């Protein structure tokens, strides 16, 4: 088919090769998580059977003045450079991740196919399930060996616009974006690299950021399920701000524990439960869909991370409304680091916000 041939040509032309994320090598890289409100970065090295932190940092991104659409584009490279300097990272080789409505991660299962037939089948599958036009995106996949009855694997899709944006930010900060990963897969990579869990148990990792919440689920079949939810920290904050006719910045300051007695702190915190209902519903529906689709039990435990997970009472709120036991997850409780490192305080206090960056840092080239 002409369409398949065109898609194959695209795969050969793209600057970022998704398949490189599965290859192993020795070059030193660091994980660069370019979020909508903050830059997070982590550099690791292998420490016996696990990992140890060599450097880490987090810097807020200034969105610019209201109505200035180019403000973020101007400020992100500067924030990346500032984070690099504060963290003391010397390498220029960055591993970045993408998530949100311009991406998709799906499991595929085809009848047994010859290796040369898989690519065409994947491209057709992507065209069917992708939430956006695949002509505007990049499709790649990884076959999972071991199943003689089916050809199993994971396909990933992202828009060229999003990939170009992340790569452009790194380039403007004088970095080389050597690998591109999916945030959800990076979370699972981080979890497997530092956390033990019982075989046969279905677990979920929920990363709640400002503009996107990523729910990554893994079960006994060892096949990841990733869903990005558009209702996250920003939407929660804006809903509370609208009710009280105050600015989103004021609400955010209250939720993040800033001392500001002039604001209606008690009311804002009480309204957090109502504002989180849509997120709770989205999580519940996703967990149920996964259990039905995979014919397994619901997830027994949810590990919560991301910047919004640091809001006081947020994780307890989720725990009281979700069927699975929910706890705050700081991967650096398991990943070792020297207490004398400049970033030690960040890892202790804001470690949950750096989970994606840590997963990206575990990739090798």
Image (cartoon, helix red, strand yellow):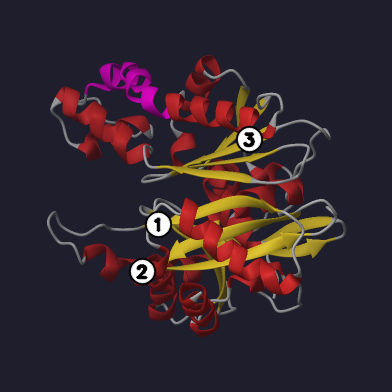
Which residue does the numbered mark 2 point to in the structure image?
A: 161
* C-alpha gap between disc 3 and disc 2: 29 Å
Residue 312 visible somewhere in the drawing: no
Q: Are marks 2 and 1 in contact (CB under 8 Å)?
A: yes
Badge 3 density bin: few <14, some 14–19, many ≥20, Cα 10 Å: many
Q: Residue at x 26, y 70 (%)?
A: 74
Q: Which residues are magenta?
A: 264-279
Secondary-structure class at tag 3: strand
Which residue does the numbered mark 3 point to in the structure image?
A: 204
Secondary-structure class at tag 2: helix
* C-alpha gap between disc 2 and disc 1: 9 Å
Percent from the top left, x then y, of residue 170? 44, 74
Q: Is residue 331 above or below residue 25?
A: above
Q: Is residue 2 above or below residue 224?
A: below
Majority secondary structure of the magenta segment? helix
Q: First in sequence, mark 1 or 3: give its number.
A: 1
Q: Nearer the viewer, residue 88 or 358?
A: 358
Badge 1 density bin: few <14, some 14–19, many ≥20, Cα 10 Å: some
Q: Quadrant of the C terminus?
A: bottom right
To which quarter of the image does residue 161 belong? bottom left
Percent from the top left, x then y, of residue 129? 48, 51
Q: Nearer the viewer, residue 306 or 346?
A: 306
Q: Residue at x 37, y 68 (%)?
A: 136
Which residue does the numbered mark 1 point to in the structure image?
A: 102
């Amino acid at each position: 088919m002409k369409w398949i041939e065109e898609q194959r040509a695209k795969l050969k032309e793209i600057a970022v090769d998704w398949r490189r994320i599965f290859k192993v090598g020795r070059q030193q890289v660091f994980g660069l998580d370019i979020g909508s409100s903050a830059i997070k970065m982590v550099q690791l090295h292998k420490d016996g059977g696990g990992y140890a932190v060599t450097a880490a940092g987090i810097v807020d991104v200034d969105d610019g003045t209201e109505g200035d659409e180019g403000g973020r584009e101007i400020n992100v490279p500067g924030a990346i450079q500032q984070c690099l300097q504060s963290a003391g990272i010397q390498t220029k080789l960055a591993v970045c991740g993408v998530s949100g409505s311009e991406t998709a991660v799906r499991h595929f299962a085809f009848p047994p196919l010859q290796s040369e037939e898989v690519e065409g089948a994947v491209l057709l599958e992507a065209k069917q399930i992708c939430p956006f036009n695949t002509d505007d995106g990049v499709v790649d996949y990884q076959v999972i060996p071991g199943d003689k009855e089916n050809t199993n694997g994971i396909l990933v899709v992202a828009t060229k616009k999003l990939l170009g944006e992340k790569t452009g930010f790194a380039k403007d900060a004088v970095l080389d974006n050597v690998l591109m990963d999916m945030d959800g897969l990076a979370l699972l990579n981080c979890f497997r690299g530092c956390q033990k869990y019982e075989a046969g148990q279905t677990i979920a990792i929920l990363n709640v950021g400002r503009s996107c919440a990523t729910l990554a689920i893994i079960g006994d079949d060892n096949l990841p399920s990733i869903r990005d939810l558009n209702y996250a920290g920003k939407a929660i904050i804006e809903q509370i701000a609208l009710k009280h006719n105050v600015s989103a910045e004021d609400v955010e300051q209250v939720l993040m524990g800033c001392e500001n007695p002039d604001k209606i702190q008690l009311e804002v915190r009480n309204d957090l439960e109502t504002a989180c209902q849509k997120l709770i519903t989205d999580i519940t529906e996703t967990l149920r869909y996964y259990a039905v689709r995979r014919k397994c039990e619901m997830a027994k435990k949810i590990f919560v991370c991301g910047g919004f997970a640091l809001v006081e009472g947020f994780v307890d709120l989720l725990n009281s409304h979700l069927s699975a036991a929910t706890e705050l997850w700081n991967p650096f409780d398991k990943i070792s680091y020297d207490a004398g490192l400049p970033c030690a305080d960040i890892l202790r206090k804001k470690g949950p916000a750096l989970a994606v960056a840590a997963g990206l840092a575990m990739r090798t080239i």
